[in-house]
């Protein structure tokens, strides 16, 4: 890819302005265990963290957000599909210290208007089913 193409410059500018950091240590080493460690889910640690609730003491506890490429792609596609109408969805992930890690996102089957989106019983049922299926 040309290092001076307008799309490359635009991407690099956006990454700099938004403090984008790639978590993979090296593009050639992206299959290493180190780059996959972010996806490891320690249920005991998550339960302990949720019981401690440090965000209830400090409302600015979370300082960083890490979003997987897949989750970001799903969010953008869903947002674009709504056009000028609002959309609604959920993000799934975990916490790691002062970071929220978004590993997946999914759209909700809701009816939207120009001013609001209302989640009805169908959307609530869909959220539960989707979450339960992902846990299996």
Image: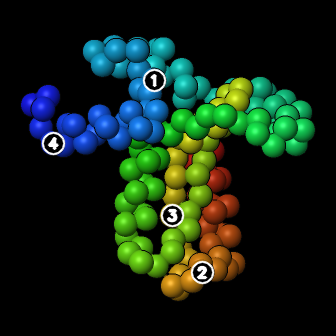
Task: Tell me how far mark 1 sits from mark 3, CA to CA.
Answer: 26 Å
- Picture quadrant where residue 38 is located: top right
* Residue at the disc numbered 1: 23
Whichever of callouts 4 and 1 sits on the residue coming sooner in the sequence is 4
Whichever of callouts 1 and 2 sits on the residue coming sooner in the sequence is 1
Task: Using the image, tell me which numbered label, if any, was put on residue 116.
Answer: 2
Whichever of callouts 4 and 3 sits on the residue coming sooner in the sequence is 4
Q: How is the image coloured?
A: rainbow
Q: What secondary structure is marked by label 3?
A: strand
Whichever of callouts 1 and 3 sits on the residue coming sooner in the sequence is 1
Q: Looking at the image, which is closer to me, 78 or 132?
A: 78
Task: Using the image, tell me which numbered label, if any, was put on residue 55.
Answer: none
Task: Tell me how far mark 2 sits from mark 4, CA to CA.
Answer: 37 Å
Q: Nearer the viewer, mark 1 or mark 3?
A: 1
* Residue at the disc numbered 4: 6
Q: Residues within 10 Å of mark 3 (few under 14, many from 20)?
A: some
Quadrant that contains the N terminus: top left
Task: Tell me how far mark 4 sits from mark 3, CA to CA.
Answer: 32 Å
Quadrant that contains the C terminus: top right
* Residue at the disc numbered 3: 107
Q: Nearer the viewer, mark 2 or mark 4?
A: 4
């Amino acid at each position: 890819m040309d290092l001076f193409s307008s799309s490359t410059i635009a991407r690099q500018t956006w990454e700099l302005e938004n403090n984008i950091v790639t978590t993979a240590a090296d593009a050639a080493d992206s299959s290493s265990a180190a780059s996959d460690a972010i996806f490891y889910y320690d249920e005991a640690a998550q339960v302990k963290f949720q019981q401690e609730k440090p965000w209830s003491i400090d409302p600015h506890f979370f300082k960083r957000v890490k979003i997987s490429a897949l989750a970001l792609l799903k969010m953008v596609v869903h947002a674009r599909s709504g056009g000028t109408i609002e959309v609604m969805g959920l993000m799934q992930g975990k916490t790691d210290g002062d970071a929220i890690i978004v590993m997946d996102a999914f759209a909700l089957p809701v009816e939207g208007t120009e001013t609001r989106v209302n989640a009805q019983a169908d959307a609530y049922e869909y959220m539960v089913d989707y979450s339960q299926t992902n846990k299996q």
